[in-house]
Image (cartoon, rainbow, N blue to C red):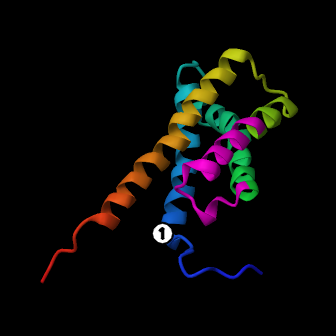
């Protein structure tokens, strides 16, 4: 087992929880918004059918990249989570009989990049800003 160096640190549990929940919610939002443009009898089932391959891909992305070690880092963790979410999501869609036509793939690439990398960029910047802010009080 690798020992941590003095300046190495694991993220706070709250940071890991935030990143995991944010990723999950954003993948679900991607699926729900995408399905909202289709007239369906049951939009919840439609969104779930669209979401599950990407949720499974997201889980694989977290495991493969060990994103919990640096959940807000864009490179390599965030990019790996995004790339694996897309690749695995498309494979799972195809294996389950769903389509993966080029326009859908392009939209998924762009939207999930904005979502999964964007929230990391914003949260990482806010985190750095609060670390360097002067302490208030006496």
Is 65 left or right of 47, judged from the image as shown?
right
Q: Position of residue 102 (x, y in %)?
A: 72, 16
User: In terms of depth relative to the viewer, which is nearer, 46 or 135?
Assistant: 135
Q: Which residue is mark 1?
A: 14
How far across and how far down the image is residue 41, in percent? 61, 25
Compared with 33, 1 (above or below) is below
Left or right, 92 with respect to 106, comes to: right
Image quadrant of residue 105? top right
- Quadrant of image for the N terminus: bottom right
Residue at (74%, 58%) from the top-left corner?
63
Q: Is residue 78 magenta?
A: yes
Name the magenta segment's main secondary structure.
helix
- Residue 22: give x, y in percent of width and height: 51, 51
Residue 70 visible in the shown view? yes
Q: Is residue 41 visible?
A: no
Secondary structure under badge 1? Answer: helix
Residue sitting at 57 percent across and 18 percent down? 39
Start-end of magenta stretch: 65-87
């Amino acid at each position: 087992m690798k020992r941590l160096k003095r300046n190495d640190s694991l993220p706070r549990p709250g940071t890991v929880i935030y990143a995991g929940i944010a990723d999950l919610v954003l993948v679900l939002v991607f699926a729900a918004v995408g399905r909202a443009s289709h007239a369906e009898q049951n939009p919840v089932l439609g969104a779930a059918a669209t979401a599950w391959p990407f949720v499974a891909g997201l889980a694989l992305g977290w495991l493969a990249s060990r994103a919990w070690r640096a959940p807000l880092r864009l490179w390599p963790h965030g990019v790996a989570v995004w790339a694996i979410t897309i690749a695995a999501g498309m494979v799972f869609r195809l294996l389950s009989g769903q389509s993966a036509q080029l326009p859908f793939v392009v939209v998924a690439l762009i939207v999930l990049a904005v979502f999964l990398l964007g929230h990391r960029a914003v949260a990482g910047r806010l985190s750095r800003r609060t670390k360097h802010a002067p302490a208030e009080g006496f």
